[in-house]
Image (spheres, grey):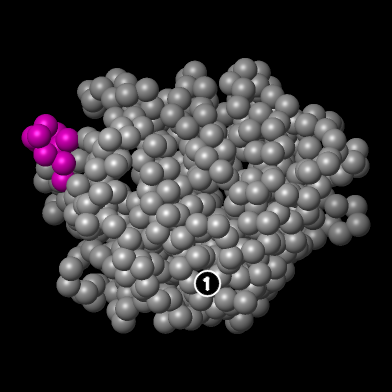
Amino acid sequence: MTNTKLRTLAVLLPLGFGVAGCNSDKLTNLNVNPNSPEDVPASSLFTAGAVRGVNLWLGANYDLRGTEFVTQHLAEVQYPDEDRYARLTGGSTQGYFDTPYIQELEDYQKVISKGTTANQAGVYGPALVMRTWEFSYITNTWGDIPYFDALQGDSAKAGVLSPKYDAQKDIYADFFKVLDKASKDMSSGSGSLGSGDPIYGGNLVGWQRFSNSLRARTALQLVNVDPTTARAQLTAAFAAPGGVLQSNSDNAKLVWPGDGVYNNPWALNFATRDDHRISLVLMDLLKSNNDPRIPIYAQPTPADPSVYAGAPNALLASAAAPYITSASRPGAVFYPGNTAYGFYGGGGNSFPSFLMTYAEVEFIKAEAVQRGLATIAGSAASHYQAGIRASMEQWGVDESAIDAYLGQSSVAYKGGTPGLAQIAQQKWIALFTDGGQAWNEWRRTCQPMSVQPGPAATQTAVPRRFQYSITETSVNLTNVNAAIAVQGADVFTTRMYWDKQPTAAPTYFTGCGVRGQAPAP
């Protein structure tokens, strides 16, 4: 990651990283579209696409105003409409669906075209990976989406202005093909994005490992509905050229310059808003094992600097108000220093955003071994422990504290279905700051079991998907209706393809995600 490249791009393409307001429709975007000039270098297009995409999916809107509440890493203590699902309808979240198609996915598509024309896998390979990473969020949020016909509006051959919606099963099948191609081509391909690559700085081994790890993540997402494909793709991902992420030094992350133009989007949000608190669900799980990540993920409560506490999800504003002072803010590492409401945090403006981590890969390996989905070195227990250690090291936990944590009987790996629950819970904890992927994992595993709608939520079950954008229902209604006819009603409770057989999950329990149905601890 070269901050100089981002600063240079700031002159050409100023960012509109506005602080998230109450209206979640107003997504941040680039003030100048890099696709407007007659020709823009692939490296500049890639930088712009990566910054936009990371800012969207791991930033102040989809993440902080949506999925972090749905998966219950965080709770909302002022204006709790998103936490109650009241502002997660198709009118409120349309920007999450619309924006990628007209901005960063278009950027990646142009990079792929330029790199393919020049026969430079070092240019098109990373764009293929990022394009797949972004599309995975879109399909995992809505299910069937425009994919094969998407981004063809300005194509001389196609000119598709009303793209059809493709089945998620087919989209996943293409993900595997694309990631396989990217990994193999980058093994011997020429060309590089160099300083235009804000993730790996042009290092193709890093991109191979990210590509293969993303392939493993994608494969495991299918395990409940198609274990045969999950097994085959996991095996292929682990054996692919370059391997998977091997240490925290391989983490796919964007380190923000923190220069006032390109700041970490969480820090940018927290500079002027004070409505996020750690969810009671996350805090209780951390406290149950004396987790040393507590003072990193969270701050002491404003009311008592000796106490860390969570806030319940989905309360009415009047009921949530006391938790403004009695529950913990997110950790100081996410704050920019002086804020509009007088809190002084850490150096959050330059804190990295994590696209995928070594810790997650180790948890994928642990589950794959425990379930007999892949033959790899190491036991489920060893990969489980490695995942915990990697996450804690990623967040700066002292080695002695990690050893003490792993030495607890409550943390020791139990094996079997209890072991799978442990893996799922630890992965969910490690995914803090990536609410979308944590939500994916929760839907797949029903872990943690305590995730369920709060008392003032607008429905009695945790959403399984978001509603389609009202923009689409306005301009592409025929194709939207065709998708609904196949997938099911455009409501929160409709299950997408990989979520159709929840009872196939060993950790499933009756009433998963339904208010009042969580099993007793």
Label total for image: 1
Identify which residue, 205 or 300, lies in the foreground. 205
Give me the residue at 52% from left, 22% from top.
Answer: 257
Q: Is residue 307 magenta?
A: yes
Would residue 245 appear left or right of 422 to someone viewing this image? Answer: right
Q: Residues within 10 Å of mark 1 (few under 14, many from 20)?
A: few
The C terminus, quarter of image: bottom left
Would residue 143 appear left or right of 360 to someone viewing this image? Answer: right
Quadrant of res 227: bottom right
x, y percent for residue 46: 70, 35
The residue that disc 1 covers is 372
x, y percent for residue 178: 74, 56
Identify which residue, 275 or 515, lies in the foreground. 515
Q: Which residues are magenta?
A: 300-309
Q: Secondary structure at mark 1?
A: loop
Give me the residue at 85% from left, 52% from top.
Answer: 155
Would residue 521 appear left or right of 152 to someone viewing this image? Answer: left
Give me the residue at 64% from left, 73% from top.
Answer: 229
Give me the residue at 22% from left, 57% from top.
Answer: 409
Q: Would residue 105 be seen by someone viewing this image from the given angle?
A: no
The N terminus, quarter of image: top right
Would residue 444 appear left or right of 97 to someone viewing this image? Answer: left
Judge whether 201 appears above or below 519 on screen: above
Q: Principal SS element in the magenta part?
A: loop
Q: Is residue 438 magenta?
A: no
Tell me the kind of residue under disc 1: Gly
Q: Would residue 398 be seen by someone viewing this image from the given angle?
A: yes
